């Protein structure tokens, strides 16, 4: 029988069951329960015609009246340049952005939000604030800051390079055991 989040918290003494609680949350996110609900809120609640990539570009351009050059936009969105170009083309066709040439360098194209894009960004910002308040409103401001810091640390610990280092360490331990060398795993933080 699967335990609910309430039961898990109620039956776990402080300091116990943290890994189980973490992986319970992880499973729920992986299954898409939380992600699907947030996507419905973020996409369907704002504009069902926008993909998550389009929302990312709109939010990157939000608050930038002069826009960004395509190179900078690609770095900010942290996506493949071809994908960002396709996304910008889709947003252009839908009327969310304007594209124009740089005054100083005719090879560089800039993108900025249209009035339609600004309105979508404002709706998205209101929605993000509402979801944040719903999820973390019970915490004090310092509690929210601490949780966000901890989430960033956890995400950094799960970066591809950290996971590769962990896999390499596990391989080395297993290889040492295979050839008969006793060794203990290093308990070092991987950042």
Image (cartoon, rainbow, N blue to C red):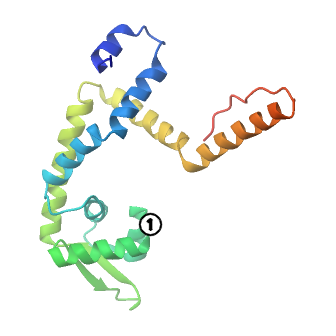
On the rendered image, what quadrant is the N terminus found in? top left
Residue 169 position, x and y percent, is 71, 38
Q: Residue at x 15, y 61 (%)?
A: 120
Q: Is residue 59 left or right of residue 105?
A: left
Is 113 displayed left or right of 2 in the figure? left
Q: Position of 30 compared to 161: left or right?
A: left
For the image shown, how many numbered marks are present on the structure? 1
Single out the residue that lies furthest toward the bottom: 106
Quarter of the view holding residue 92? bottom left
Q: Position of residue 154 (x, y in %)?
A: 49, 37
Q: Secondary structure at mark 1?
A: helix
Q: Which residue is mark 1?
A: 75
Closer-to-camera residue (31/45): 31
**Up-down: is 179 above or below 113?**
above
Looking at the image, residue 117 lies above or below residue 124: below
Camera-side residue of 13 and 127 = 13
Q: Residue at 37% across / 71% down in the picture?
A: 83
Mark 1 packing: few (<14 Cα in 10 Å), some, or many (20+)? few
Q: Residue at x 20, y 33 (%)?
A: 134
Q: Quadrant of residue 121?
A: bottom left
* Relative to 23, 45 lies left or right: left
45, above or below 21, in the image? below
Where's residue 168, x and y in %? Answer: 70, 43
Q: Which is nearer the eye, 65 or 146?
A: 146
- Kindly indicate the quadrant of the structure image that contains residue 76: bottom left
Q: Quadrant of the C terminus?
A: top right
Image location of residue 113, percent across then percent down: 21, 70
In the image, what residue occupies the spot 73% across and 30% down? Answer: 186
């Amino acid at each position: 029988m699967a335990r609910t989040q309430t039961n898990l918290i109620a039956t776990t003494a402080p300091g116990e069951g943290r890994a189980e609680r973490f992986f319970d949350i992880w499973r729920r996110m992986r299954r898409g329960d939380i992600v699907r609900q947030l996507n419905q809120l973020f996409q369907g609640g704002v504009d069902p015609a926008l993909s998550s990539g389009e929302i990312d570009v709109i939010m990157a351009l939000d608050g930038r009246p002069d826009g960004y050059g395509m190179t900078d936009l690609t770095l900010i969105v942290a996506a493949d340049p071809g994908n960002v170009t396709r996304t910008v083309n889709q947003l252009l066709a839908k009327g969310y952005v304007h594209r124009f040439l740089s005054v100083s360098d005719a090879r560089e194209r800039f993108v900025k939000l249209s009035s339609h894009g600004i309105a979508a960004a404002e709706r998205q910002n209101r929605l993000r604030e509402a979801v944040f308040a719903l999820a973390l409103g019970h915490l004090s401001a310092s509690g929210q800051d601490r949780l966000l810091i901890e989430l960033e640390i956890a995400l950094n610990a799960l970066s591809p390079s950290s996971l590769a280092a962990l896999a390499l360490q596990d391989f080395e331990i297993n290889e040492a055991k295979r050839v008969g060398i006793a060794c203990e795993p290093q308990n070092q933080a991987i950042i």
